Amino acid sequence: MVKSQSRRCCLCILALVCSAAIICLCIYFANKNTCEFTHAAVSADSEMCSNIGRDMLRQGGSAVDGAIAALLCTGLVNPQSMGLGGGAIFTIMDKIGKVKIISSRETVPKSVRADLLKDCPKTLTLTTGSQWIGVPGELRGYERAHQLYGKLPWAKLFEPTIKLAREGFPMPVYLSRFLQFDMIKMLIQNSQLCELFCHKNKTVFGPGDILKFPKLAETMETIAKEGADAFYTGKIGKDLIQDVQAAGGVISLEDLKAFQVRVSDAWSVQLGVYKMHFPPPPSGGPILNFILQLMHGFKLSPASVQGDQKNLTLHRYLEAAKFATGQKHNLRDPLFNSRDMTYITDEKFIESIRALISDGSTQEASYYNINPSADRFGTTHVSVMAADGTAVSVTSTINHMFGSSIYSPKTGIILNNELADFCGRADSVTPGEDLSPKISSYFSHILNILVTLLSNVFTGEQPPSSMAPAILQSSSQQKTLVIGGSGGSMITTAMALSIMNHLWFGMSLNESIAAKIVFVDSKNTVNFEHGYHKTAIEAMKALGHNVKGYPFFFNVVNAVSKEGHCLSAVSDARKNGRSAGY
Ligand SMILES: *[C@@H]1O[C@H](CO)[C@@H](O)[C@H](O)[C@H]1NC(C)=O
Ligand SMILES: *[C@@H]1O[C@H](CO)[C@@H](O)[C@H](O)[C@H]1NC(C)=O
Ligand SMILES: *[C@@H]1O[C@H](CO)[C@@H](O)[C@H](O)[C@H]1NC(C)=O
């Protein structure tokens, strides 16, 4: 009796243990199947740089640590897009969900030519030359972000990239394809950039060639040891300025010393059940938000892109994008322009614009307030979520491909052409204000002290931008989306479409970013990415949209999303991107 009872008991326990084990395994595999990552993830432009960012996170780094390490790496893999000679805008969410902006976008130098904007090109082209160089802010941005949110030592973030720069790595596929374009090939072969990207016989590298950045490795080593001051007030700065001035540029050591990074609260706006956080003007954040707010009012759902709704939704989007282009003229640095742009998030304003969208017709450019101008392309983006709940969305740029195309041989740095971003948007540019000569010396002395305390005034105007690094979080905090893009004027378009695809049309993050885009340019023409559905294009032509074709689409979106405890990360395949996580 006792024996059989205890045997039964044993069997029972065994059965219980077995079912518990099966349940555990099921949960494990279910999670494994549905969760791409469960701790942290990085979406940068390339697998190598996403991996470098992820390794920092694995070692206990914050999202900022991961982002900086991935950005440094991207400066080597996509040196045409970004680097220490450029500027960046960070959108950073801390553990309790508070979102800050760190902007180290380039500024107008003190001795800028007053009539600079007379040189603005009228058509889409590379705008090269030393007159377009803005005061580089990139490193001051990293420095401040790291001071406020970094966990790992500063020097550690540089280690993997210094090694890559010194030892070299095979030409990235994207870059080598790019160097084969005639326009780019000519640019490289006829400039000092040839030192980096050419064989001894002065022809550009191809696939399989090894890319090295020995001078930049030295520069980064010094900055890793001595901090950003080595660049802004030390030897690197002096060398850089000598090279820039030798190329005819006007940036001075005083400009570098005066550069101020700007830290502010994000603009945070309710978008349905999500709160969207993005940087204020002169970033493209308000434009992105404007498109999404306009579209949100059309009560979009997966049905909006199915069957008979499809053409209408696309048409409404194009109209919204045109009104957004019309708003771009108002995007200026608030420190230097009295125009207040907060109206663009106002519900009544959005509604009034939505009422101007007619479902059956299109209008002339002036209806949308579009003043035809030229578009621009370039830039990179990194999205990061760390295991501690911090998140970073950062967009960084030297502006056009290879920036100004001015290379500093002493430091290994490629200089931006950010001032070209004023073209088509502004009539004049404002250098850092020097108040002293205007007022009697006594007052000017006091003023100087005040002004130095308020510091921003000595730094120059920031050019308007399309960069819109964003973080969206649902009110239940169940879902967070860290997203941003590159591709100049195409940034806000590509981001808006990806966000709509994912949050409203029910696509996976991967599908949302892979979906073909349509870009309304600054001349009010509509450009469909190669491979876009033909019937949709015909429908838009029939509605009167001025459809033309761009030969190149440089739009790239990199994003990380977190739902519950599951993370997924996508780097755009258009730039051969691969994300990483664990
Ligand atoms: C230049 O040098 C590279 C590498 O040595 C070689 O592959 C290429 O054919 C050369 N091109 C010309 C035009 O000589
Ligand atoms: C969308 O427009 C195209 C081209 O005019 C047309 O062939 C198609 O039937 C339209 N779709 C719907 C659902 O109306
Ligand atoms: C993501 O989308 C791309 C392009 O459609 C596809 O090639 C890739 O296999 C997808 N990856 C995943 C993980 O779904």
Image (cartoon, rainbow, N blue to C red):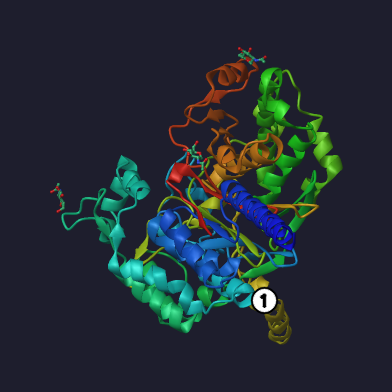
So how many labels did they put on this image? 1
Q: In which quarter of the image is residue 222?
A: bottom left
User: On the picture, is 567 further left or further right than 344?
Assistant: left
Q: Residue at 80% across / 46% down in the picture?
A: 273
Asked if residue 79 can be seen in this view, the reply is no
Question: For mark 1, does the 10 Å Cα neighbourhood hold few (<14), some (14 to 19), or many (20 or more) residues?
Answer: some
Choose between 43 and 537: the one closer to the eye. Answer: 43
In the image, is residue 29 above or below residue 311?
below
- Looking at the rendered structure, the kind of residue marked 1 is Ser
The residue at which mark 1 appears reads as 455
In the image, is residue 68 above or below residue 553?
below
Q: In which quarter of the image is the N terminus?
A: bottom right
Q: Residue at 32% across / 49% down in the picture?
A: 187
User: On the picture, is 398 further left or further right than 454?
Assistant: left
Residue 407 percent across, percent down from the top left: 35, 63
Choose between 113 and 128: the one closer to the eye. Answer: 128
In the image, is residue 394 above or below residue 411?
above
